[in-house]
Image (cartoon, rainbow, N blue to C red):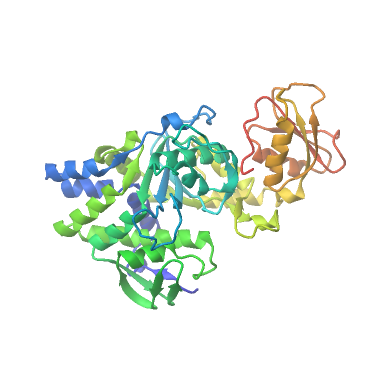
Amino acid sequence: MAGTHRSRRAKSAPPSRGRRILLWTAVGLAVLVLAATGALGWIYYQLNGNIQAAEIEDRLGDDRPEDLSPDAMTMLVAGSDTREGTDGSYGDTEGMRSDTMMIVHIAANREWATVVSIPRDSWVSIPACDLGDGTESEPHHGKVNESFAIGGMSGDVGGAAACTIRTLEQNTGLRIDNFVSLDFLGFKEMVDALGGVDVCLDEPIQDDKAHVDLPAGCQTLDGEDALGFVRVRYSVGDGSDIGRIERQQEFMRSLAEKAQSKLTDPTALYGFLDAVTSSLTTDPELAGLRPLYDLAEDLQRVPEENLSFITVPNYPRELDVPEDTANVVWEYPRASLLFDSLARDERLTEEELEAAAEELPSLRPSDVQVQVLNGTGVTGQAGEVADRLASAGFTVVGTGNAAAGEVAHTVVGYPEGLAEQAELLAARVPGATTEADDSGPPGALVLTVGTDYTGVQGG
């Protein structure tokens, strides 16, 4: 495959170890920081002071998922792709973007952890977000990484993180209380402080958009080329965001291994740690070397075989909306199985997810017709839900009011032969149950929206 990247040490480093190093790096390399600076108090306080804290609690709103496992830890890890300070070298995009987005869940018993990669092209429902000037954005649908840009319009990483968390909470049902963000320019400085990072390419990579021109073979990338390498997308492999996620993970492994090799080089190590900490912004709970160290210790205690990396199950949105060839949608009910298990703090490996998927119907939203009935007592609710379902790819055949008036629980009614379609729809509407019901239009489900309705995942 064109442009395949191999770490020079990849053959001797098991994948599980490489993945652990990736997560360790993404969270801040806290163990390495303390190991290197513990004997030098002034360095410790210098690096500790580099880490920026951003308050997000008052920006997350009241309509949040219930925290079903308070002792577990679920956090957002994002790469802030701001162009500020680049003089247009990487394009003219204003404000902030996030090229890398992950949800990290550490179990309450600290015996397992799961990292969920979120493709940035995921088409999701983006709620109203605080714009930092006393106003809010309009709720709409878009790519998930747009939420980072909306919240960060004022240049505030905390606002970007808060809007992203609101978006992920609405679309996953997970409660997310912490975040770590690593900025765009800091990545270059980390690589340069280490004297570059080694990669091996099976074939050359040339991409004007990412400003990268690399020959085939093994080579050492400086910060500028490394940044282009992890950003490149369309000219490598299948051009997908999924492929880029895999390359970024491999490169982060190589970066962390290079950092480990510099433990006896005080100058290089300090430059690297200064770049890492200067590039970090976190919520107040994690803002410091000590809390990051505690977090890294929790991760270190997780057995290798209990650390899972999963990309949200997805498929091209054009299968549901033919004119959209640029985005992906999350595949339900597999996605809801993943998110529901994490919300309950129950481990689900990628293998178990795939096995469970084999027992689930191989249906897409476009295969499902649904009538929406309003049982909430809120005027216009059926129309709003219908719009969300249509955006998610379902075929809405009508709306109306529930004959029983206001009802407490959201129910998907299905005629004989459509039980699988009902399960698919229920998976997209948190809390919905299914029951046999042949009162709807021929061949269609009936979604009666109750007062417990909280939204449509991915719609």
For this rendering, which residue is in front, 153 or 116?
Answer: 153
| Residue 201 coordinates in the image, percent (x, y) | 40, 74
Res 406 quadrant in image: top right
For this rendering, which residue is in front, 390 or 134?
Answer: 134
| Residue 235 coordinates in the image, percent (x, y) | 50, 70
Q: Is residue 51 above or below residue 410?
A: below
Give the farthest residue toward the right.
442
- Numbered marks: total: 0
**Could you tell whether 265 is left or right of 21 in the image?**
left
| Residue 331 coordinates in the image, percent (x, y) | 62, 50
* Identity of the residue drawn at 28% across and 57% down: 190
**Could you tell whether 455 is left or right of 61 in the image?**
right
**Does residue 143 appear in this view?**
yes
* Identity of the residue drawn at 65% across and 29% down: 453
Q: Is residue 239 above or below residue 330?
A: below
* Identity of the residue drawn at 45% across and 51% down: 97
**Could you tell whether 398 is left or right of 3 in the image?**
right
**Does residue 12 appear in this view?**
no
| Residue 434 coordinates in the image, percent (x, y) | 73, 34
Q: Is residue 97 above or below residue 250?
A: above
For this rendering, which residue is in front, 348 or 255?
Answer: 255
Quadrant of the image containing the C terminus: top right
**Could you tell whether 68 is left or right of 54 in the image?**
right
Res 42 quadrant in image: top left
